[in-house]
Image (cartoon, rainbow, N blue to C red):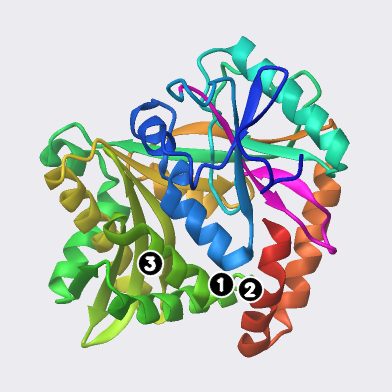
């Protein structure tokens, strides 16, 4: 069975379904405790519109039954990096929506048989769930830190938990500098945000994702995607993009103009976000994943008193990956990107990201 064909077909008690068209999908995502914004149709629509990735889910729930479990993937086809199933491209995490480890193993066995039949290079999952057994056939391809901030305490209690020098004082500094703030889900704030993302990616020698990705994301997510921009005398100096799902909010993208980083704009944006999230009844702010070799970002998130956990990218079949070799590849890629002008770096992002997934 090829992805995109014969959806709702059954093999060995497992059905393949199309999450964009199966009427049961929204209810599963609204009720399953491990579901996140990365399981939603809005996120999947943006991936398909921007990169042509086809979503597919596998479940033991028959088409006539309530949908109670699923493993969600996108098919990534690339002449450059090979064809594979990824759960999910450009998503910090995408937990298996299963009831127990046995169900998870049953679904994984089916996906592996399909991988062999379709000759996909590998199957990839991104999970922070320590209960599931990824040992049988899987190997860790990458490890990250995942930070989440519990928003259930009072605003006063949350504020007192922030690092006094690096967070609290910078919030006060932003107020003293008379920074202004705009927030919205429309297109008007997207261009200044993208400009700030380009500046930040350029500083880190990484190509920015294409503007179309952000436009499609804002369009498909609607009111559940929000851009927040801080201005100094009318000039955008920092911006973030957040995504909502139920009582959880995800910080997904952020950028700044380094010339104004001393003004405290980014801490101000996060503080405004936390306040608005509390007013909306949000109980958790997911600050996203951080590379282990980026201690500065990890420290920044910990200064908000966010709890951290281990997030692992698992691949099947098991392949021994040398961390030193992977680090060398990343370092060499950044050295090449550091020599490219910003216009070429942006073009590289447009050409390459669909192959990365």
Residue shown at 84% from the left, 30% from the top? 318
As drawn, is 171 to the left or to the right of 76?
left
* Residue sitting nearer the eye, 247 or 116: 116
- Residue at 78% over, 18% down: 136
For the residues labelled 3 and 1, say whether their Cβ atoms are less than 8 Å apart: no
Q: Is residue 79 covered in magenta? A: yes
Q: Position of residue 291 (x, y in %)?
A: 60, 48
Q: Is residue 192 above or below residue 308?
A: below
Look at the numbered discs 2 and 1 and tell me whether their residues touch, using CB distance below 8 Å: yes
**CA neighbours of label 3 inside 10 A, class few (<14), some (14 to 19), many (20+):** some
Examine the rendered structure and indicate whether residue 42 appears above or below residue 24.
Answer: below
The tag earlier along the polypeptide, 3 or 2, is: 2
**Secondary structure beneath label 3:** helix
Looking at the image, which residue is at 46% across and 53% down? Answer: 43
Q: CA distance from mark 3 to mark 2?
A: 23 Å
Tell us which disc is closer to us: 3 or 2. 3
Nearer the observer: mark 2 or 1; the answer is: 2
Marks 3 and 1, Cα distance to the nearest angstrom? Answer: 23 Å
Rendered location of residue 227, percent (x, y): 31, 66
Residue 258 shows in this picture? no
The residue tagged 3 is 219
Q: Which residue is mark 2?
A: 207
Secondary-structure class at tag 1: helix
Q: What is the distance, in whole Å, between disc 2 and disc 1 at their CAs? A: 6 Å
Q: Residue at x 54, y 41 (%)?
A: 93
Quickly name the residue at label 1: 201
Q: Which residues are magenta?
A: 68-87
Task: Tell me where residue 35 sits by quadrant.
Answer: top left
Nearest the camera: 140 or 306?
140
Earlier in the chain: of badge 2 and badge 1, it is: 1
């Amino acid at each position: 069975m090829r992805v995109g064909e014969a959806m709702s077909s059954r093999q060995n008690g497992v059905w393949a379904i199309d999450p964009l068209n199966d009427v049961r999908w929204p209810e599963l995502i609204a009720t399953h405790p491990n579901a996140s914004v990365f399981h939603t149709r809005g996120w999947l629509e943006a991936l398909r519109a921007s990169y042509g990735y086809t979503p597919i889910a596998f479940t033991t729930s028959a088409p006539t039954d309530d949908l109670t479990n699923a493993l969600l993937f996108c098919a990534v086809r690339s002449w450059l990096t090979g064809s594979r199933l990824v759960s999910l491209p450009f998503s910090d995490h995408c937990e298996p929506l299963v009831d127990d480890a046995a169900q998870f193993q049953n679904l994984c066995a089916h996906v592996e048989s399909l991988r062999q039949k379709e000759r996909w290079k590998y199957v990839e999952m991104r999970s922070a769930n320590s209960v599931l057994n990824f040992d049988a056939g899987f190997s860790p391809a990458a490890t990250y830190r995942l930070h989440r901030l519990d928003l259930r305490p009072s605003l006063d209690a949350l504020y007192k938990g922030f690092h006094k020098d690096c967070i609290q004082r910078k919030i006060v500094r932003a107020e003293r500098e008379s920074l202004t703030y705009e927030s919205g889900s429309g297109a008007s704030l997207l261009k200044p945000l993208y400009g700030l993302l380009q500046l930040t990616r350029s500083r880190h020698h990484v190509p920015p994702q294409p503007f179309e990705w952000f436009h499609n994301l804002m369009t498909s997510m609607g009111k559940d995607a929000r851009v927040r921009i801080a201005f100094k005398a009318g000039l955008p100096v920092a911006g973030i993009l957040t995504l909502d799902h139920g009582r959880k909010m995800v910080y997904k993208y952020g950028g700044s103009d380094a010339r104004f980083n001393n003004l405290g704009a980014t801490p101000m944006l996060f503080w405004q976000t936390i306040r608005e999230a509390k007013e909306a009844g949000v109980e958790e702010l997911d600050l996203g994943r951080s590379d282990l070799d980026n201690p500065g970002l990890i420290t920044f998130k910990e200064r908000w008193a966010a709890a951290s956990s281990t997030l692992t990218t698992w691949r099947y079949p098991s392949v021994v990956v040398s961390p030193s070799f992977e680090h060398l590849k990343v370092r060499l890629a950044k050295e090449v990107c550091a020599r490219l002008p910003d216009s070429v770096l942006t073009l590289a992002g447009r050409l390459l990201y669909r192959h990365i997934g």
